[in-house]
Image (tube, grey):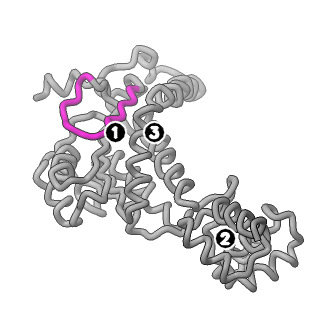
């Protein structure tokens, strides 16, 4: 087993950092920075696979399904992080994107040695979540061999879920049946085997891309502003007024009045202002178009023109 693990891309030595221990602070920082500059380019090369994965997630969300991240170590922590940021950022249910790490929540702060070594634990996790064909199970294992992650993917596939595997290993070394394989081989780490570095950065980039795009397609964003917001405190009330004012070019005071009529829902206020519809009619059209402001406004304007 040791010889096989030693052949993993993430375990190879980086020729550009062989003298790291004798370098100055500035030199170490420059080495790290130069290596980091390759990451976005490697991610860009996998855009077809990232697109396919995001399409699966979008389809799951349309059907009230979930995106379930499963990982270990840094990979698991990044999955949990991405999942935890979705509800406050997009006013989405915490059930929609969920993250799980081998060893449970304790492993978020303290390494739980050996927790990743048991594929049966990954399978048990998926069973405990009542995974179905509505869901997407996304395994994250930069090495490509984490048993806990592979077990969760296998069980998810057996239950009919769509499956996505993210790794920083070369795809030719991956032997698991999934719907989409995202392989971002960023090359050897500056410090051999320290996958919290380039591999972790690549993971964060890809997870951000997938969930951000899926949230945009679910109508959580209009133009490039987070509009799925209900103003429930002073800070959010101010943000909501500024968003409405910015998008519609109305005054801050007019935005305040629109939000009062819309029960402090930004989307409803936007549709009201852009289409001259009532709050009730705006809500109906937003429901009809799954919360998409642009589609609701376009359809209301068409209806008004025909009338």
Vertical order, 13 against 191 (above or below): above
Q: Nearer the viewer, residue 56 or 34?
A: 56
Residue shown at 30%/63% (left/top)?
105
- Give the extent of the magenta segment: 172-185
Identify the disc placed on residue 166: 1
What is the number of callouts on the image?
3
Q: Residue 89, how many percent across, how many down?
A: 56, 63
Identify the disc placed on residue 267: 2
Determine crowd level at label 1: few under 14, some 14-19, many 20+ residues with C-alpha closer than 10 A: many
Tell whether 83 sits left or right of 257: left
Q: Tell me if I can see residue 114 in this picture.
A: no
Q: Which of 302 and 34 is in front in this view?
A: 302
Q: Distance between the residues labelled 3 and 1?
A: 13 Å
Instruction: Of the two numbered discs 3 and 1 on the same chain, state the one appearing first in sequence.
Output: 3
Determine crowd level at label 2: few under 14, some 14-19, many 20+ residues with C-alpha closer than 10 A: many
In reply to whether residue 178 is colored magenta, the answer given is: yes
* Residue of label 3: 51
Front tag of 1 and 2: 2
Front tag of 3 and 1: 3
Q: Residue 126, how many percent across, how many down?
A: 20, 59
* Image quadrant in which you'd find residue 270: bottom right
Q: Distance between the residues labelled 2 and 3?
A: 27 Å
Quadrant the N terminus occupies: top left
């Amino acid at each position: 087993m040791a010889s096989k693990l030693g052949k993993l891309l993430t375990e190879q030595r980086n020729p550009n950092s062989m003298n790291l221990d004798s370098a100055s602070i500035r030199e170490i920082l420059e080495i790290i920075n130069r290596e980091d500059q390759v990451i976005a380019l490697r991610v860009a090369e996998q855009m077809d696979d990232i697109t396919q994965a995001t399409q699966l997630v979008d389809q799951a969300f349309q059907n009230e399904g979930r995106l379930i991240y499963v990982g270990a170590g840094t990979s698991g922590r990044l999955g949990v992080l991405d999942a935890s940021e979705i509800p406050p950022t997009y006013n989405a249910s915490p059930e929609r994107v969920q993250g799980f790490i081998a060893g449970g929540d304790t492993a978020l702060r303290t390494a739980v040695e050996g927790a990743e070594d048991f594929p049966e634990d990954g399978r048990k996790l998926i069973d405990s979540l009542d995974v179905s064909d509505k869901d997407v199970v996304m395994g994250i294992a930069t090495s490509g061999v984490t048993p806990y992650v592979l077990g969760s993917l296998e069980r998810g596939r057996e239950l009919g879920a769509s499956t996505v595997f993210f790794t920083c290993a070369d795809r030719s070394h991956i032997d698991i049946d999934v719907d989409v394989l995202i392989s971002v081989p960023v090359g050897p780490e500056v410090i051999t085997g320290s996958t919290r570095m380039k591999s972790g950065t690549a993971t964060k980039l890809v997870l951000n891309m997938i969930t951000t795009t899926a949230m945009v397609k679910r109508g959580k964003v209009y133009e490039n502003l987070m509009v799925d917001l209900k103003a429930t405190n002073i800070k959010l009330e101010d943000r909501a007024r500024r968003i409405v004012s910015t998008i519609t070019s109305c005054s801050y005071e007019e935005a305040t009045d629109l939000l009062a009529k819309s029960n402090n829902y930004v989307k409803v206020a936007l549709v009201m202002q852009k289409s001259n519809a009532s709050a009730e009619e705006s809500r109906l059209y937003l429901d009809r178009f799954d919360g998409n402001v642009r589609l609701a406004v376009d359809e209301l304007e068409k209806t008004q023109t025909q009338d």
